[in-house]
Amino acid sequence: MTAIRSSSGRRGAVGWLFILPFLAVFAVFLVAPLLYAGYLSLYTKGLATGTTFAGLDNYTRAFTDPSFLKGLWLVLRFSLVVIPLQMIVALVAALVLDEVTGRLARFSRLMIFLPYAVPAVLGALMWGFLYSPSFGPLEQISSLFNVQAPFLLSQGNIFYGLLNVVTWQWSGYYMVIIYAALKSIDTSIYEAARIDGANARQIALRIKVPMVSSAFVLILVFSLIGTLQFFAEPQILGPIANGSVTPDFTPNIYAFNLAFAYAQFNYASAISFALGFVVFLAVAVFMVATRKRGSIFT
Amino acid sequence: MSNRHLGAKLFLLALVCYFLIPVWWLVVASTKNAQGLFSGSGALWFHGFHLLDNLHDLFTFNNGEYLRWLGNSVLYAVTGGIGSTVISVLAGYGFAKYSFRGRNLTFALVLGAVMVPLTALVIPTFVMMSNAGLTDTVWAVILPSLLSPFGVYLMRVYTSAAVPDELLDAARIDGAGELRTFLRVALPLMRPAVITVLLLSVVATWNNYFLPLTMLSDSKLYPLTVGIGLWSQLASSNNGGGQSLWSLIITGSLVSIVPLVVAFLTLQKYWQGGLAVGSLK
């Protein structure tokens, strides 16, 4: 008895050894920066006054700063549109791919996924070229029909321009996740449903969609975290978008500019921390909400 | 029945067209010279063939800085990707196959960390690195890339399901030590998840922009993403001299997406199953 206990105790210690490298990285590159950001955000640095304790001043400033609030509002609005859009594209593609077999289906699955392997920076650049009036095809195609192509990077349109870039980039990845979940469903359920007189659409909506709902939760969490931190795409499209991307376009771009253009590291840390807090809160609320109801679509 | 599938196939073709258009454009555009690029003749079709000239220009421009960036990207992706995969595999196995005090609390922290937006950490990490004198070195990019809470989560979920306890116990009874049991018995069974985590972390490091943009100011250390971003900034800020730079950017973009596309195509057997792991509880 004692021998078993001591051996399992030793084995527990081995368990710690296995997770030790991760814990070290976790402590240095997650916990420490988080605490440090929290610490920095409580101070201000003035040219004349030096570094002084400011309490929550940076946060009152952040949450009343029109630049931060405007950026936050943009990423929130953007998530509200882009997440359902990606989910629908990914879900429909996955459902169709689950039905159709053969070479075309295999080829399509890979091609739809392909943009995931393209860096966000290059995805944004490529679409920027396609939108461009001087070398993109949009202009040429519209001139065939004698209409003026909308410039998707103008102040009024950049929201849609970015929407397209992000949907293009991520839908395929989400499609693969949903598709794999669909493939793990026992197909005898479909047989039973068919015998009960269900048609393909009913099987898709009533059986397949609810059965892959845990994949939706994963995707929603990923895309929520991703879009609220929006940075690379607007930052890259900025120089060719003639001023549509302002230095406070998204909270991350704002924090970056505060830190590196204005050397306001304390306030930038407060912005980062506040953004992190908003993201964490949004995801946590979402997780609790979906866990309680079991699945989000039923 | 066949009618419905015809509709489905047309729908798939339309999707493929949409997802391929930018890549197709990139391939076509990188075979054109600057004049063909701006002449306004069909952006989606070939006009002369100058790919080899473009590649030559790309690799020799500014003392071959593109090749340097390519090398840096490979360095960051390989070290960051392999490093974070090894760390995630060890931790995932530890969480899945050992019971020890504090395990659940620690794992809850990992799950919480999945929800922390990593870019929110970039600026404080920069200040910390700067205090340690590590900014503007390769370490400033590699070390933070080692953190992958999602990789740990994925490995734990997969290992719990794919590696039976009985098999590990049998190996232990045969006298194998803990490390040997892990390497010889568990690791081969974990292979699909290992390859998936490796691909995910290599892609994350290869595609990263915010972190290296923040950490590096010496352009000799830039990865491709930051380097090409710099070129595009230069090209749009001076329109006259920018023309030749645009064709470098286009060819450079094509070359830099090739390695990952090839990796995904050749390893598809593994990642297609592995990616779903996180969603199957």
Image (cartoon, coloured by chain):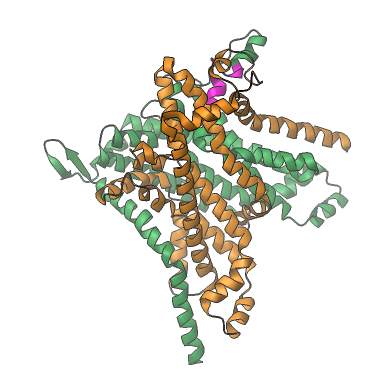
Chain colours: A green, B orange
Q: Indicate whether A107 appears above or below A286.
A: above
Front-most of residues B223 and A39: B223
Q: Residue furthest left?
A: A48
Residue B181 position (above or below residue A59)? below
Q: Position of residue A61 (x, y in %)?
A: 27, 36
- Residue at screen point 56% across, 20% down: B33
The quarter of the rendered structure image containing the C terminus of chain B is bottom right
Observer-nearest of B8 and B207: B207
Q: Is residue A83 visible?
A: no
Quadrant where the image shows the N terminus of chain B: top right
Residue B187 position by quadrant? bottom right
Q: Is residue A133 magenta?
A: yes
Vertical relation: A202 (above or below) A143: below
Q: Magenta segment range? A: A125-138
Is residue A103 in the magenta section? no
Residue B47 versus residue A1 in the image, above or below: above
- x then y, percent, for residue B31: 61, 25
Say which of A89 and A207 sits in front: A89
Is there any visible trace of residue B174 in the rendered image? yes
What is the x, y in percent for residue A88? 64, 38
Main structural element of the magenta stretch: helix, strand or loop? Answer: helix
